[in-house]
Amino acid sequence: MITADIHTHTTYSSDGRSDLRDMAEAAVQAGLKIYGVSEHFEYEYERMHLTIDGKEPRQIDADAYFSHIRILQREYRDRMLLLAGAEFGFDHNARTQERYRRVCEDYKPDFIINSVHVCQRHDCYFADYFAGKSKSYAYNAYLYRILESLDASYPYDIVAHLGYCARNATYPDPKLRYEEFSDVLDEILKKITAKGKILEVNTSCKTAGSPFLPDTDILTRYFQLGGRNISFASDAHHVSRIGEKRDLVCSVLKKIGFTELTIPYRGKFIRHPL
C-alpha cells in the first residue's frame, strides 16, 4: 500500500474545504507515513485577472499558512513526516515567475509542485476553454504549455496532473491517450527525465475517462524512456479524499516496473518503497 500522499489542499487554498489540522489528522488515521500539503499559489490568475464564477480566486496568506504548518510539523513529527509544500500555477510571464522565486526564498517550502492550469487565458478545468476547439487543438495547446512549463525559472520538484485538461473536458471521449499525442508527450517525458524532475500520478480525475492522471499508457512510456521518479497525489481538497485509489495506483505502478515513490524534501529525494 502507498503510504505517502504529497499533493493536497486545505482551506488556506481558495478551493480547499477542510482545515489544515483536520487534514493532518485524517492523514494519520489513513496510515500515511509521509503527508504533503501543497497550497495553491495562483499568481497567474492574478496577473491575467481571471475569474471563477465572476470572482478572482482568493490568494493565499503565505505568512499564515507557513507559520501554521511549521508548528504542526513539530507537533506531528513522531506520527508522520508532514511536508510544507506549495503548488505554483505556471505562467510564462517573467514577473510572475519572479514572485514564485520570492516565495521559495522567503518561505523555503519543503517541495514545489509545478502545475499548468491556465492555457490561452482560460483554466483548462472549465468548459469555456474547450468552446470552439477540437479535442486535438485543445489538448495539444495544453500539452505544449506543459512542455514550456518545464523550463520555469523557479526550483520546482514535481510535474503535476499531466492530463488536467481532460478532467472536465466537454468532448464525448475526453481521455488523453498516448497514441494520439505521442510526439509532444515524448518530448515532455524525456525532458522530465533529463531534468531529474518527478512525474506525479494524480487520482483526482473527475470525468477524464481515466482512473488517474496520466493514465497507464503514458506512465508505461515514461518508464520505457528511463523515467523512474514518480509521486502519488490524491489532490484532496477535503479529508474524505486523502489517499484515494492508492492501492490501485500501487498495483499499476508495480506492474509497469516501478519499485518506489520519489518524495522531494528540502532539495533532496526520499525513496519510498511501493
Image (spheres, helix red, strand yellow):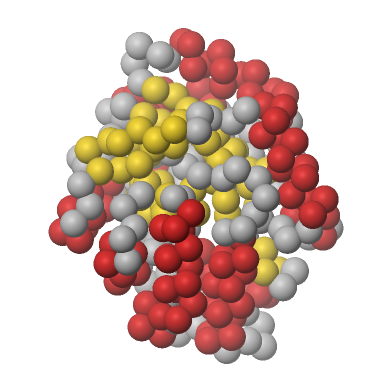
Residue drawn where x is 40% and y is 14% of the image: 77
Q: At which x and y percent is residue 11?
A: 61, 34
Relative side of 248 to 168, left or right: left
Name the image quarter holding residue 152. Answer: bottom right
Q: Quadrant of residue 222?
A: bottom left
Q: Examine the rendered structure and indicate whether residue 88 appears above or below residue 68.
A: below
Residue 211 visible here: no
As rendered, which of 39 and 208 lies closer to the eye?
39
Query: Viewer-proximal residue, 58 or 44?
Result: 44
Quadrant occupied by the C terminus: top left
User: Which residue is farthest left?
Assistant: 255
The image position of residue 154, as x and y in percent, is 65, 45
> Residue at the location (78% across, 58% down)?
93
Up the image or down, 273 lies above or below 63; here it is below
The residue depicted at 46 percent of the width and 50 percent of the height is: 197
Quarter that holds the N terminus? top left
User: Residue visible at 49% across and 77% down?
Assistant: 184
